Image (cartoon, rainbow, N blue to C red):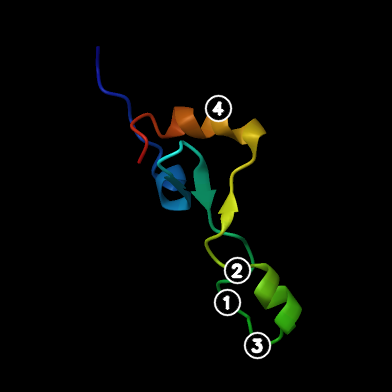
Amino acid sequence: MPKLKTNKAAKKRYTQTASGKFKRTKANRRHLLANKTNRQKKSGSIMNAYADKTCEAAIKKMLPYGN
C-alpha cells in the first residue's frame, strides 16, 4: 500500500491537538489592521479557534498522519 499524501494547504492551516481536535487560525488578523476597530482585532485573537465538527472528517482525510 503506498503512502498517502498530505494536503499542504491543510497542513499550513490546521494543527491537531492531543485530544484529536483541529486548531485553526481565525481570519482577518494578517494585514490592514490599522483601519480595523479594536473590537474587530480582539475578536480575531489569532490561534484560539477550533475547526467545526462537520469539517473534521474532511480535515482528517487531508492530514492522514495528523500533522
Mark 1 belongs to which amino acid? His
Residue found at x 55% / y 27%: 57
Residue 31, x across and y down, in percent: 57, 77
Q: Could you tell me if residue 36 is visible in this image?
A: no
Residue 22, x across and y down, in percent: 50, 43
The numbered mark at residue 57 is 4
Residue 40 quadrant: bottom right
Residue 58 quadrant: top right
**33 over 3 or under it: above or below:** below
**C-alpha separation, residue under disc 1 versus residue under disc 4:** 31 Å
Disc 3 is placed on an element classified as loop
Mark 3 belongs to which amino acid? Ala
Mark 2 belongs to which amino acid? Ser
**C-alpha separation, residue under disc 1 versus residue under disc 3:** 8 Å
In terms of depth relative to the viewer, which is nearer, 3 or 21?
21
> In this rendering, would 45 be left or right of 18?
right
Residue to which mark 1 is pinned: 31
User: Within 10 angstroms of label 4, few (less than 14), some, or many (20 or more) residues?
Assistant: few
User: Within 10 angstroms of label 1, few (less than 14), some, or many (20 or more) residues?
Assistant: few
Q: Residue furthest front?
A: 19
- In the rendered structure, which disc, 3 or 2, sits on the residue that comes first in sequence? 3
Single out the mark in the foreground, 3 or 4. 4
- In the rendered structure, which disc, 1 or 4, sits on the residue that comes first in sequence? 1
> In this rendering, would 64 be left or right of 33?
left
Residue found at x 54% / y 58%: 25
Disc 4 is placed on an element classified as helix
**5 over 39 or under it: above or below:** above
The numbered mark at residue 34 is 3
**C-alpha separation, residue under disc 4 versus residue under disc 2:** 25 Å
